[in-house]
Amino acid sequence: TQNSQLIKISKYLSYHLRHNPGEIGLELEPGGWVAVEALLAAAQAHQFPLTRSELNLVVETSNKQRFSFDSTGTRIRANQGHSIPIDLQLEPRCPPDILYHGTGHQAVESILAQGLQKRARHHVHLSPDIDTARQVGMRQGKPVVFTIKAAEMHQAGHLFYCSDNGVWLVDEVPPEYLVLG
Ligand code: HQG
């Protein structure tokens, strides 16, 4: 399977496992899981034939580890990034002192004034390192990276979660915990 085909499959999975499972007749189980058999059948029925081995390849090679199988290998889910109401059943965790958020330069003024808000997703996404944050920001044009005083936020009672692929998730970041650059 070619790389371009894997990207196409990854986008198809992102869309249906994070945003619109109903479009191909799927319903996600608690935790965001769906039976692999059901996914393959639904894709087949909706003109997107997909094999188990292609699915394995996408899960293994996704540069951001966007998807996981459960321990039995019979169910799959997106690790984060959902817009539909899904409880990922993550436990609150103690974050590192500092986390990062990459965004586009056009958002800076608004973020400094209002803080970071989750918008369409379940959480605000934070990165453990500057490089990753910069890559996230590049999706929005000229990238800008904010430093987040995560330990201070945590001490003040904000809950932090970490997805299976290492993305830190919070409800919001008030402006006082943000530093530009
Ligand atoms: C911005 C990708 C103005 C925020 C990435 C971001 C990530 C504000 C955008 C994952 C704001 C939301 C998530 C405010 C927040 N004023 N703009 N007050 N508060 N924003 O895509 O973090 O490839 O929902 O800065 O790698 O960019 O999909 O979030 O720019 O991990 O796996 O509102 O998506 O992963 O955009 O990206 P998004 P994000 P995948």
Image (cartoon, rainbow, N blue to C red):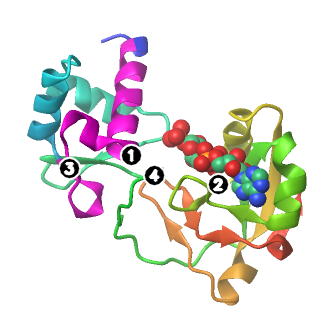
> Which secondary structure, mark 1?
helix
Q: Are marks 4 and 2 in contact (CB under 8 Å)?
A: no
Does any portion of residue 101 appear in the rendered image?
no
> Which secondary structure, mark 2?
loop
Q: How far apart are marks 2 and 1 (CA)?
A: 19 Å
Q: Quadrant of residue 152?
A: bottom right
Mark 2 Cα shell of 10 Å, populated few (<14), some (14-19), many (≥20) = many
Dot 1 beta carbon under 8 Å from ligand 1: yes
Q: Which of marks 3 and 1 is nearer the N terminus?
A: 1
Q: Is the magenta stretch mostly helix, strand or loop?
A: helix
Horizontal relation, residue 142 to residue 9: left or right: right
Horizontal relation, residue 137 to residue 82: left or right: right
> Which secondary structure, mark 3?
loop
Q: What residue type is labelled 3?
A: Glu
The mark found on residue 18 in the picture is: 1
In which quadrant will I find the N terminus?
A: top left
Q: Are marks 1 and 4 in contact (CB under 8 Å)?
A: yes
Q: Which amino acid does label 1 sit on?
A: Arg
Q: Earlier in the sequence, mark 2 or mark 1?
A: 1
Q: How far apart are marks 1 and 4 (CA)?
A: 6 Å
**For the residues carrying marks 2 and 1, which lies nearer the camera in this image?**
1
Dot 4 beta carbon under 8 Å from ligand 1: no
Q: Mark 4 points at which residue?
A: 83
Q: Is residue 33 magenta?
A: yes
The residue depicted at 20 percent of the width and 50 percent of the height is: 27
The mark found on residue 27 in the picture is: 3
Mark 1 Cα shell of 10 Å, populated few (<14), some (14-19), many (≥20) = many
Magenta region: 5-34
The mark found on residue 73 in the picture is: none
